[in-house]
Image (tube, rainbow, N blue to C red):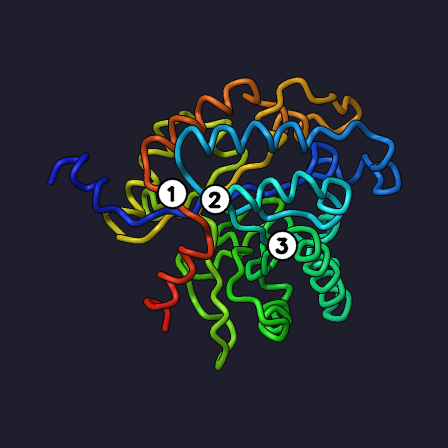
Amino acid sequence: MGARAADAIAPVNGLSVDVEDWFQVGAFETVIERAEWDGLAMRVEANCAAILDMFERAGVKGTFFTLGWVAKRHPEMMRRIAEAGHEIASHGWDHARVFTLDPARFASDLHETRCTLEDITGQRVRGYRAPSFSIDARTPWAHEVLADHGYTYSSSVAPIVHDHYGWREAPRFAFQPVPGSPLLEIPVTTAEFAGRRIAAGGGGFFRVLPYGVSRWAIRQVNTRDQRPAVFYFHPWEIDPNQPRVTHAPLRSRLRHYTNLARMQSKLAQLIGEFRWGRMDEVAAREAVLAA
């Protein structure tokens, strides 16, 4: 079967945006205090507008995993996203990693964020993504809390080893983490190379590495594994003119700022080359396989 024929019958992949502003990222959490956030230049609304325009030109729908903190300050942006037919899902309130919370605080974070998103958009929130993919072996209770709160799916696990996150032992593809519950966990995409898992689901990996790496990885998942890929990026990643945090560690600055100017064109190429849809649609199809 040729590449074009294989692509034509490939699964619909999950296209997702983690909606947070440039100063809310994990790379800067030790140098920018939450108390400073309201005094910083907010660029997320303009960046999301550019993303909506890009999605509209490509004729695709996606899922916007949004911080409650952002939604509260940009309600018109949230309504525009929902009215364009995209899914609104939760990214937590203020980017606190799950392993820094206890079950009660996590439950409160889920509740406050969901109420805010639903009140603003009128759209039912069924999906959740942990900040920095921070559901891992340290949080065995997190999926149970999500199930108790009636979430349909989570996309909060990175089944790799990484210095910021990762749960190497987790399955690569969708699984039901809570016995007796229909809750589905859909890990971010990894590929396999020389017997090792490698990150291939977007973000900094997509920005820094050549485009061909992502093409190869998604085709591997779609054709060899016959499963959908899960891809994510952030609004600040298409914004090369954002403020520079010069007092952050060099490693963090390199991760954050590399190839920002190239990101939008790479995204347009990726969106045009593969089949994409909302994460709730991917979850509905994957639930049949996981059952």
Q: Is residue 11 left or right of residue 48?
A: left
Label 2 close to label 3 by CB (< 8 Å): no
Q: Earlier in the sequence, mark 1 or mark 2?
A: 2
**Residue 152 or residue 132, whichever sits in front:** 152
Q: Which mark is residue 276?
A: 1
**Residue 14 or residue 208, whichever sits in front:** 14
Q: Is residue 1 above or below residue 208?
A: below
Q: CA distance from mark 1 to mark 2?
A: 7 Å
Q: Please state the horizontal and vertical placement of residue 267, each as a whole percent of the image.
A: 45, 29
Q: Please state the horizontal and vertical placement of residue 127, each as a whole percent of the image.
A: 55, 59
- Quarter of the image with the C terminus in it: bottom left
Q: CA distance from mark 2 to mark 3?
A: 14 Å
In this figure, which residue is indicated by the disc labeled 3? 90
Label 1 close to label 2 by CB (< 8 Å): yes
Q: Earlier in the sequence, mark 2 or mark 3?
A: 2
Amino acid type, label 2: Gly
How crowded pointer 1 is (Cα within 10 Å; few <14, some 14-19, many 20+) is rated as: many
In this figure, which residue is indicated by the disc labeled 2? 62
Q: Please state the horizontal and vertical placement of residue 258, each as a whole percent of the image.
A: 58, 22
Q: Is residue 5 left or right of residue 80?
A: left
How crowded pointer 3 is (Cα within 10 Å; few <14, some 14-19, many 20+) is rated as: many
Which secondary structure lies at badge 3? strand
Residue at point 75%, 30% (across, down): 42
Residue at point 48%, 38% (across, down): 202
